[in-house]
């Protein structure tokens, strides 16, 4: 049984998020997703997500391609999460390319191409204009 893990904020859930989760699941038999907490997201982007961490977690948890979810509280805990959830493969979008190579000693790190022309920021911007 190959266990795949991935991480993200997944705010204002969109097709790019769905696509990476779907593709991640296909790389193994069991998909675990770490959903960034509101605080972690704030520390990274200097703004709180539109949807709360509980709403984001609930959305991710309800997807057919996702088997298990948990809150990711800090980037610094990445190695602990990989060990705790017994991951074989770590998947991230290629905007993170190279950033997690140091974990190749305990998992296989794979960066998948991002879905072009969609991001949470662009969705927020479009809604603002409407
Ligand atoms: N993604 C994608 N295509 C897009 C937008 C996002 O494939 N058009 C991917 C990202 O590459 C990432 C995942 O969807 O792998 C989640 O994206 P974000 O919610 O933006 O996650 P981020 O804030 O980068 O948090 O520990 C790492 C962090 O938790 C990642």
Image (cartoon, grey):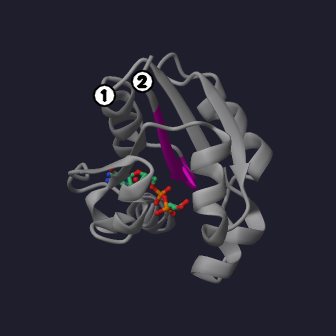
Front residue of 27/106: it is 106
Q: Position of residue 32 (x, y in %)?
A: 56, 33
Q: Report whether 111 appears left or right of 40.
A: left
Seen at 34% across and 44% down, the residue is 16
Circle 1 Cα neighbour tier, 10 Å, few/some/many (<14 / 14–19 / ≥20): some
Circle 2 Cα neighbour tier, 10 Å, few/some/many (<14 / 14–19 / ≥20): few
Seen at 26% across and 60% down, the residue is 94
Give the quarter of the image for residue 26. top left
Q: Quadrant of the C terminus?
A: bottom left
Q: Quadrant of the N terminus?
A: top left
Front residue of 48/94: it is 94
Give the quarter of the image for residue 33. top right
Question: Label 2's element?
Answer: loop
Front residue of 32/49: it is 32
Q: Position of residue 119 (x, y in %)?
A: 38, 58
- Residue carrying label 2: 2
Q: Position of residue 116 (x, y in %)?
A: 20, 54
Seen at 70% across and 52% down, the residue is 51
Residue 123 in the image: above or below residue 70: below
Read off the magenta span: 4-12
Asked if the residues shown at circle 2 and circle 1 are in contact, with their CB atoms under 8 angstroms apart, the answer is yes
- Residue carrying label 1: 27
Q: CA distance from mark 2 to mark 1?
A: 8 Å
Cβ of mark 2 under 8 A from ligand 1? no
Question: Label 1's element?
Answer: loop
Seen at 57% across and 53% down, the residue is 11
């Amino acid at each position: 049984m190959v266990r795949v893990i991935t991480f993200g904020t997944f705010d204002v859930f969109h097709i790019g998020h769905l696509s990476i989760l779907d593709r991640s699941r296909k790389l193994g038999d069991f998909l675990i997703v770490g959903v960034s907490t509101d605080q972690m997201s704030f520390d990274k982007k200097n703004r709180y997500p539109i949807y709360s961490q509980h709403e984001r977690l609930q959305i991710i948890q309800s997807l057919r391609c996702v088997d298990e979810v948990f809150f990711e509280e800090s980037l610094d805990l990445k190695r602990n999460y990989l060990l705790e959830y017994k991951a074989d493969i770590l998947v991230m979008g290629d905007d993170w390319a190279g950033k997690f190579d140091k974990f190749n000693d305990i998992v296989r790190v794979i960066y998948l191409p991002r879905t072009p022309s969609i991001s949470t920021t662009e969705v927020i911007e479009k809604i603002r204009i409407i």
